[in-house]
Amino acid sequence: MEYTREIYWNVGHGATTLVPMYLLSLAAVAILVYAFLQRVKIYKQGQKLDRTDQLPLRVTMMVKKVLLQSKVLNVRGPGLAHALFFWGFFLLFLGTCLIVLQADFTDLFFGVKFLQGSFYLFFSLTLDIAGLVAIVMLTGLLIRRFIVRPAGLENSKDDVIMHGLLLAILISGFIIEGARMAVTEMGTPLAAWSPVGLWVAKALSSMGEPAVRGLHSNLWWLHLLMVIVFIAIIPFTKFRHIFTTSANYLFTDLGPKGLIPTIDMEDEEAESFGAATVTDMTWKDIFDADACTSCKRCQDRCPAWATDKPLSPMKMVQQIGEIAFTDPAASLPETIEKDVLWACTTCRACQEICPANIEHVNKIIDMRRNLVLMEGEFPGEEVMTAMENTEVNGNPLGLAFASRGDWAEGLPVVSLGQSTDVDILYFVGCYASFDKRNQAIAKAFVQLCDAAGVRVGILGKEEKCCGEPMRKMGNEYLYQMLASENIEQIKGYGITQIVTTCPHCFNTLNKDYRDLGLDVTVSHYTEYLAELLEQGRLNLTPQSFDCTYHDSCYLGRYNDIYQAPRTLLAAAGAQLTEMEKHGTESFCCSAGGGRILADENIGTRISEKRAQMAAETGAPTLISNCPFCLTMFEDGVKGADLDEQLQPKDLAEILVERISG
Amino acid sequence: MKILLVAEYRDGKLLGTNSELINFATQMGGENCMFLVGSDSTLPNYTGKLYLADAGQAGEFNPSLHKQLLLNVIEKEQPQMVVLAHSSYGWDLAPRLALALKAAQISEVVEVKDGNLVVPSCNAKLRRQVKATTDIAVVTLQGGAFTPAEEPSGAPEVIKVEVAAAGSDIQFAGYEEAEAGGVDLSKAEIIVSAGRGIGKPENLEMIENLAKALKGEYGASRPVVDAEWADPSRQVGTTGQTVTPKLYVACGISGAIQHLAGMKKSEFVLAINTDKDAPIGEIADVLAVADLKQLVPILTEKLNAM
Amino acid sequence: MKILVCIKQVPDMESKFKVNTTGNWYDYTDLAWRMNEYDEYAVEQAVQLKQQVGEADLTVLCIGSDRVRETMKKALAMGCDRGAHIADDESYLKDSYAIASLIVSYAKDKGFDLIFTGMQSQDRGSGQVGVLVAEMLGIPSLTTLVEFNYADGTVTAKRELEGGIKAKVSCATPALVTCQLGLNTPRYPTLPNIMKAKKKELISTPAAELNPEASLLEVLQVAPPEKKGGGLVLEGDPADLADQLIKILKEKTTALA
């Protein structure tokens, strides 16, 4: 027999089928387009932002991410379910397109049919499996959402409609197929190639042909109507994420991770700084709310949320969308609440996991900028004091700038003011310079460099805070002042390579400072030492020890440096037991986002929570490589009463004990 | 040389600094006499001439009137030096007096060296030796810098000072007591602080007892406050209170930089810690390497027995 | 209403101080400079008063070298309208009396209703200038204020006394007040105000033009205090240690007085 089927069987080929079908489709699409255009007006309330550069690259990224569902799959369980559902539905969609293509175009005008032969067999089987998978996955997701009810997953009318409508469309599709097969394909070899339809057909076998035909044509029109409704309500429901989330892949931030827009301080026209209302934000900030599907993956990973602080990244993003649509003149800090804004540690766990490419962090910083620059407000007086200390002495601790380089006395380090005959500038940072516990890291690093024959120079008292905590708190002005002064010093000495022991300094000098004119190689010491190790310039004698390792946010998520520290640990003889939350899933120590300057007054302590996670591995040593993390863990370990069983250490301290020879 | 001492009386009581004035005058040698706006029912232990004006008539706080009364006494006694305590009364009155006398004023003397007066500068990081170029000088003494080994004794020869009713350009409407609860450590002169080394909240009591024995306040480092063993108003550090006491006793405090920043300006730091290398040792004048749970109670006992 | 606030630029107290070559003050190298902390409260209170009254002009005055203009800009950014810089590269050589005479020379014909100063400077700490200025101008002065209120030509305030006690005082304007720490919370300048401050009037007048009085005090010597035999580490039996500590406290501090 011929492997094909009659398109429009039983419902009619003529105008009585096609005209209403196309008119309805046209109407649905018109509603879809019109409604989206109305939404575009709302997005446009925001400031301009160019996210259409490098278009071919953007399109490729979008297509890949949408089709491969790579971001969705970052969370295995529900992610896989969604991906399979998506692929199923997508295949069904392609299948329908092919049918329309043939029926209303190639066959109609050119008499060309391609849905036949072995292609048709493959086509039938694929779509049946696709449909079955889609139904199974959708049912699984429905059970998860409505019966299992994971904590924090809120259900709205949208969710009920979406699950119900899609299931109805899919199931009705199979019944239609089954009805058709019951009349046209029973007992043919073709039937086996549509196993689900065959099963349905068998179930309908007790009905007589006229009844089956009646069922078929009614359900066909119902199916059509449901699809029309589906298309039309896309912009009005979470269904819109089909377009908005995909578009968000197109509009992704192609810049280095974590880069914040640098305010032009020379602009005399600027009357307002930071975001006080949604119109101060960019169109993308408003659009992000539309791309959000409330999957809550961000909220699940937010260290503030996990310790009873009022910050939910998801809620914050959605609130921006809400007021953009209902009350664009509303005050952002009052709507979102200041405690929420100050609670963020900019750890980026939200952004890293978000399957919709939403940019949470910069919105918060933008709102903080408004509070700091326009109102002179901070989360507490202690932060204002830290800012003033930095203005006076170039460090938030308020210690005399002239003693910044004192830690290096007697060590193989030179002050650049005395000699520029060095291989690298070691940008020490405030904590390693002044804090006793962290000075040990600076000393260790210098000794490691010395062992590798690297000549190290420091700016000493000419070094100022890199400005990162200030910038993340919203004080762009102070940050730029510090940065320009540091850059002037660095350029003045003709430095070509900078190494830091602090990931915040590293991230800031390597990314933020480029906007202000720094054009020098910058590395974090873990990468630098790993390279020296590989080159054979640094030799370590391993001494076995048990430990767990904390991926600091600014090294890990911000800079994707996960391997170099582990290579060094292995070379040191570490028996490493990973925490459950490691790598991209690492849980912040709480000091980022400028919060190293602030008191933690709400909820429980993030650092204690992380210390407990480390203790659960059973390892006696918690290794990190960030002065903020080390400081937080020293407090957190004591606070969690774990100081008998867990000791925080920096990687440099471990390595320096293992220098060969 | 003749010195006129200006004693203080407030709310029915003589101030303790009066004995320091007497001690200073004794150290300087020569003659001395005293002026006081006070009450003849509360006379200072002083064996010289006391010019006494009644506080009920003159008012306890009335700078221009007190100045005028003093000027009258100064005219009579012709001292070379008029000495007050560097107190809220003294530093307010002294410049008024100095200008009226066209005299140099030397504030907050801490020491007499080779006959010259020494005052602190820059948070006591430096000391200046100064000399008045005028015939008469007004001097204020830092509280606690001239504490006598023994309290003076004796009764003064009282000379009543007439108070002519005169208007004042400043109106004084009485005192307001300190607020209950929420201690202001920034004004405390002696502080004994508890760090994580106390181990359990129950051990905070021994810290409080030591503080009481030293007649000071107790404070705490951040971890102790965070653990809710002590009230937040007790916290010393960058995010707590910054303190400048004469004596700071850090018990079981390692000396993290945030804590140091809050108490670095202490004049004398005694640290009690089992860790010989604790960072607090960098700024401590004395580091007693011991278990505070043993040392603190013994120290308290001995102090109370004194 | 015309308001004046007098501020001083001092080194940050965290700095390590060394005596200068002349031996009469501290050396200026490697010092971080800032507004005298007490003056921050004075500026804040003056700005608050200006905001309360509405129709008011607030001048900030500072004596010193050109370096002090930076600190004056902060006062302007906090809300002062204009700056009067009295240029004197060696202001440290003038004692409180001479400094006060400079301020009086500037202020006396300008009809200020209220003058704010900090109660003392962090470097010299004499605590005299404020009251001297008031006495020279013949206006009442209230010192050591931790609370300030103004209404209808009257200042009602609270002075901070020892032991946490406060004294309630008041006087009529024109008057001068000296401010104690904790009087208010000095504001952090907003960026628009920082930018505006760059354009506000800041006039420098050489000190000599104001005919200051000569100093009444002579500085004989400046030196760091004698070492207390710092950094003593004691170990041993707790009872012995306790005895040693008590002895040290008696000798080295006034704590057991």
Image (cartoon, coloured by chain):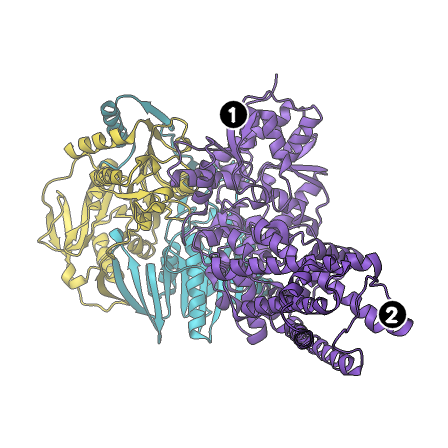
* Residue B194 location, quadrant: top left
Question: Label 1 amino acid?
Answer: Phe
On the image, numbered disc 1 is attached to which residue?
Answer: A545
Q: Is residue A302 visible?
A: yes
- Position of A355 with respect to C252 (left or right) is right
Chain of the residue where label 2 is placed in the rendered structure: A
Q: Nearer the viewer, mark 2 or mark 1?
A: 2
Give the chain letter for cyan. C
Q: Colour of chain B?
A: yellow
Q: Find residue A597 and report its horizontal and vertical position in percent.
A: 48, 49
Residue A27 as seen in the image, left or right of residue C173: right
Q: Earlier in the sequence, mark 2 or mark 1?
A: 2
Q: Residue C135 sits in which quadrant?
A: bottom left
What residue sits right under mark 2 in the picture? A106
Q: Is residue A351 visible?
A: no
- The location of residue B249, given as percent across then percent down, is 31, 36
Q: What colour has chain A?
A: purple
Q: Is residue A19 above or below residue A615?
A: below
Circle on res. B227: none
